[in-house]
Each structure stands twice: as structure tokens, then as C-alpha cells.
Image (tube, rainbow, N blue to C red):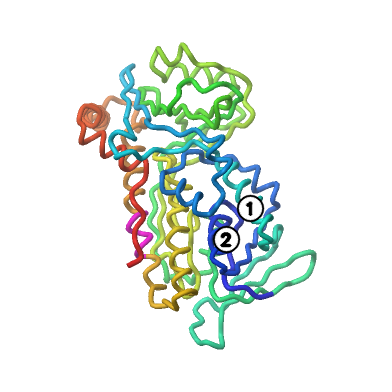
Amino acid sequence: MKTKVAIIGAGPSGLLLGQLLSRQGIDNVILERRSGEYVLGRIRAGVLEQGMVDLLHEAGVDERMNAEGLPHDGVELAFDNRRVRVDLKGLTGGKTVMVYGQTEVTRDLMEAREASGGTTIYEADNVRLHDLESDAHDTKPYVTFEKDGETVRLDCDYVVGCDGFHGVSRRSIPEGRITEFEKVYPFGWLGILADTPPVADELIYARHARGFSLCSMRSATRSRYYLQVPLDEKVEDWSDERFWEELKRRLPDDVAEKLVTGPSIEKSIAPLRSFVVEPMQYGRLFLVGDAAHIVPPTGAKGLNLAASDVNTLYRLMVKVYQQGRTDLIPSYSQTCLKRIWKAERFSWWMTSLLHKFSEEEDFATRMQQAELDYVTSSEAGLTTIAENYVGLPYEPLE
């Protein structure tokens, strides 16, 4: 098999990159070790930045999102039994976010790829990357994988790792060629999905003495809620009844009174970490999304950061194949990292501001209270939150 760009991973970032490249006539093949049904079964993020919404439009896969997604003009911070609204649209010159589940984004991209005839190979086992540092014209990278008991070779010009934190792509880079930066938080998020109407029209991020909570949604009839829990908690110890009771305790009284409860349809605990690798490229291998960076979900940046990587790499590949601009290839990592570290900062800041780190009312607790009071009573503070939440501008290549 031969292609121009081999994409490892058929999650939303791999599929989005493939769709954008295909629309520019740049041939690509996507390899995925899981089945398509498994990929669609992942319950993940659902808040899309303005930039990602625009990118999905450019990819021609925004029709259902525009019809079924929920545009949000604001977001709320709750603390001290009160709520403060951050006017995203008013503070950013008209920018908003879109609530539209990652599963739905993935489904739309899968359908678009199938309709265009693009090649996606699911259940590709034992994927291996070879000759990634090839620079000679007669030597290029290639990928091998096993499918239906046979070993297949895929020759290509470039390899893109969209296969997540545990994927093969980053692990294919020799030790000492990248540097890892990591912060692990001492708690996780217990999340449930329920077919109940959301408690509010906009997301509510709540700080409470018992711990952080988040009220989110996937649609007008499906809600997503989270609780901060210790890392040693087990999902099976949390009945639906216990979850709803604890959530009510952490919300302002007027919100708790309106909360509609019901049986959960999904329940899980996710640890929180910040993680970045530098650089995000090695020879002809480019890392995208979770393969290169992880953010705690507090700032709603995970999927959106992957989209900004895709935007940079897509525009780079267009210049390579349509203008012969191979001189821009070394700029990929530096361009992406400018925006990534700013998003990491915002996610770290939101996490530090809203979560419980100590059982005592200590100095750090008072600093949280002072910070919240300041940023929510200052237009400059609210603007900073709004600008980061809707997403900072994508970094230009040149």
C-alpha cells in the first residue's frame, strides 16, 4: 500500500485531519487498532471552541452540529452559594462555544470519510513505525501492521500520530529525543451521563468546601455531571443516589432545588494530569492531540487543543504538497507549542482555582477565595476567563 500521509488513530483528530487533507486532494490512510464501534462508544468532551467549530465547517462536517448543537454565549462560576456569569460573547467580541458531544463529532467525521471513499483500516494490530528520520529522496518512512492474520506494509511521505497518550506513535521516538513535562493532580473526576434535562442552560463550574463539581450537558435532554473525588475512590462504591445527593450538597441552593435526577447511563472516574512533550515531531513523524499533550478537563481544552494541532498540520501539509514548502516542516512543533502552553496554563489555573486541595482552611484556600473574588468582580478578570474559554486564536505558520 502507498499513500502520502499515514494517520495513526481514527479518533476525532485523526478523522478531522484526514477529512481536511482529502478535500485538498492529499491522499491519506487512517489506521486504527480498535473497531469503529469501540471508537464511537467513547464518552468524552462536549464543549467546542469557536476555532474548532470553524474548522469543522471548513471540513464540511458541520451540518448536524449546526442543527443539533447548543451554542453557549456564557458560562457560570459558583461559589459561596452564589453564581457569577461569564459573558463569553460580550467579552470576546462575539465569540461563543458549542456544546456538541465528541461522539457526535466522530460519527459525523466517520460518515463523511465513508462517503468520500477515504481508506480507514480498523482493527489494525501490531502497528509499527519505521524509518521516521528518512531524509533521502529514495528512502521514506513506512508503517507495518497486521490485518486478518497478514502483515501489511504502508509506504508514505509522513506519519501522523493521533493515537492518544498510550499509542505507539510517541513510543516510537527514541529515548532522549523528546522531553516530557508532567503534573499529576491528587484527585479525579467522577462523571455520570443521564437522560435528564440539564439543571441550567449554561455550564456551571462550582467550588465548594466538599470539593469541585461541574454541571454540563450533551443535549437538551441529556446531562453530564462531575464530582471531584479522591484518586482511590471506586466507581462501584458510588450508587446513583449517593452521586445525586453529593452533587446537591456542592451546588448553590437555587441550583440544587432544580436538579432533575435519574438513572445513570454511564459512570466513570478519570484521573487529572497535565502533560506535554517537546518537541512534537521527530523526523517525518508528527504528534497530534493526546499523543503530545494532556490537560485536566477543567478548562474544556483537550479535544480543542487536538483540533488546533490538526489546523496547524493541515495547513502545513497543504503548503508542502501545493507549494513545495518543505522548509516549514520544522516549524510545526514550535507553532503548536505556543498555543498548547497557554491552554495548559489556563487549564492548570482553573483546576487550581476551583478544586479542594486541603482538608484545612489554610493559606492556599484563602488564596483561592481571594482569586475568585477578584476575577469575578473585575471586567479584566472576567475577560481573561472568557478569552481563554472560547479559545485563543490559532497560531499562524509564518
Q: Quadrant of residue 249?
A: top left
- Looking at the image, residue 382 sits to the left or right of residue 255; the answer is left
Tell me where residue 182 appears, x and y as whole percent.
Answer: 39, 53
Tell me where residue 54 appears, x and y as whole percent.
Answer: 45, 49
Q: Quadrant of residue 236?
A: top right
Dots 2, 1 in contact, CB < 8 A: no
Residue at the image point whose x is 44% and y is 64% from the top: 315
CA–CA distance in space, label 2 to label 1: 10 Å
Q: Mark 1 — residue?
A: 112
Residue at the image point whose x is 43% and y is 51% from the top: 305
In this view, the residue farthest toward the right is 149
How dense is the environment of label 1, judged by Cα within 10 Å: few (below 14), some, or many (20 and up)? some
Tell me where residue 190 appears, x and y as whole percent.
Answer: 52, 32
Q: Foreground: 123 or 176? A: 123
Label 2, secondary structure: give it: helix
Residue at the image point whose x is 43% and y is 64% from the top: 280
How dense is the environment of label 2, judged by Cα within 10 Å: few (below 14), some, or many (20 and up)? many
Label 1, secondary structure: give it: helix
The kind of secondary structure the magenta stretch mainly shows is helix
Asked if residue 335 lies in the magenta stretch, the reply is yes
- Looking at the image, residue 67 sits to the left or right of residue 214; the answer is right
- Taking 384 as reference, is 393 above or below it? below
Q: Which residues are magenta?
A: 334-340
Query: Of the residues shown, which amino acid type is indicated by label 1?
Result: Ala
- Looking at the image, residue 131 sits to the left or right of residue 344; the answer is right
Residue at the image point whose x is 21% and y is 32% from the top: 379
On residue 18, which mark appears?
2
On residue 123, which mark appears?
none
Q: Earlier in the sequence, mark 2 or mark 1?
A: 2
